[in-house]
């Protein structure tokens, strides 16, 4: 009997993978300088988790409209408010290629739309990452210079992706 | 170092526990007659999962306002639209004490509010369950005649609850 996954199954896999990739990435970049970027705040659950596992780091949040849970809302001066196609180039001018970790969970429910968006946003994200830095995404990204990494234990293939700037 | 969980950790535990309890309950009640009730449709992820693991069953959905993902939206005649304090008594008049499985995920972000709500809604849910039937909830419930059950493998203590009508 063919038994594809339910939406709950897919969602659990995505959340579990997100957490596994973030935990892994946080430990890999622990000794690097540079800010952390969270693209897409949403409800704020992953931001809350990132604060939790990287309490000492500067975490900048890129979001169009803040609508997060009160205990997961970043301070004003850590928010880059607006469309990422504006705020990511602004961040490049401000920070240069210094980000130690960039996490993106920009997608909505529509797989095809998410993929098109990933294609468009990849070149705008790519220059921000420092050498040795990691990019963690819920969608497959389209980078020229970043190298896809193996997933850590606990992450499910296809539910998250990790990329690294090797040089 | 004290290391409480992040909101992402709690959320993952709740989703994983919800699924483990539903999968377990579906197999326990497989040979029973009677409808299944989903209280609180929300996004529709657990409803989608319930349809997936119990494709042959009648699953009635109790919800104030339908706002689910299109592929997780029940047919009109399987929805009991309105406040559960109205629709649950209606369901008792219509179905009697016949439900094989009742799943409730009616809560929001506020733990204290959820607990007060669980206290109020428990006596309205309780009479609907058939003998041998199971009630699965994300919040601790306050039943007089239903008996709390051990959780299945994979579920996290305190993140979901199972109750049974023994007689
Ligand atoms: C947490 S969501 C359910 C999420 C769902 N289990 C899922 O997986 O997507 C809770 C839902 O319960 C509904 N709800 C809360 N209180 C209610 C009430 N008194 N009567 C009817 N529906 C209610 C809300 O409208 C909301 O859609
Ligand atoms: Ni299936
Ligand atoms: Ni901690």
Image (spheres, coloured by chain):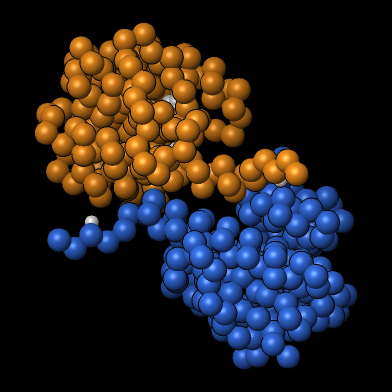
Chain colours: A blue, B orange
**Quadrant of the image for the C terminus of chain A?**
bottom right
Tell me: A94 left or right of B104.
right
**Quadrant of the image for the N terminus of chain A?**
bottom left
Judge whether B51 appears above or below B71 on screen.
above
Residue lying at the far top of the rendered structure: B144
Tell me: B159 left or right of B40.
right
Identity of the residue drawn at 84% across and 80% down: A96
Tell me: A50 left or right of B34.
right
Where on the image, by quarter, is ligand 3? top right
In percent of width and height, residue A153 lies at 51, 65
Residue B45 in sight from this viewpoint: yes
The residue closer to the viewer here, B2 or A60, is B2
Q: How many marks?
A: 0
Residue lying at the far front of the rendered structure: B1
Quadrant in which residue A124 is drawn: bottom right
Judge whether B42 appears above or below A124 on screen.
above
Quadrant in which residue B32 is drawn: top left
Residue A64 in sight from this viewpoint: no
The residue closer to the viewer here, A87 or A127, is A127
In percent of width and height, residue B5 lies at 64, 43
Judge whether A5 appears above or below A84 on screen.
above
The residue closer to the viewer here, B14 or B5, is B5
Identity of the residue drawn at 65% across and 74% down: A135
In percent of width and height, residue A137 lies at 58, 70
Identity of the residue drawn at 82% across and 60% down: A57
In percent of width and height, residue B162 lies at 36, 27
Identity of the residue drawn at 88% across and 75% down: A94
């Amino acid at each position: 009997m063919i038994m594809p996954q339910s939406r709950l199954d897919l969602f659990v896999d995505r959340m579990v993978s997100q957490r596994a990739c973030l935990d892994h990435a946080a430990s890999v970049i622990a000794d690097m300088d540079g800010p952390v970027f969270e693209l897409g705040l949403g409800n704020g659950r992953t931001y809350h988790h990132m604060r939790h596992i990287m309490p000492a780091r500067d975490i900048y949040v890129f979001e169009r409209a803040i609508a997060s849970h009160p205990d997961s809302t970043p301070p004003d001066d850590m928010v880059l408010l607006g469309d990422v196609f504006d705020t990511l180039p602004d961040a490049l001018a401000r920070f240069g290629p210094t980000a130690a970790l960039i996490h993106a969970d920009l997608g909505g429910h529509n797989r095809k739309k998410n993929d098109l968006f990933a294609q468009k946003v990849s070149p705008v994200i790519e220059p921000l990452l420092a050498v040795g830095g990691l990019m963690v995404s819920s969608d497959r990204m389209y980078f020229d210079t970043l190298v896809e990494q193996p997933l850590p234990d606990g992450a499910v293939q296809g539910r998250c992706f990790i990329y690294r700037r090797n040089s």
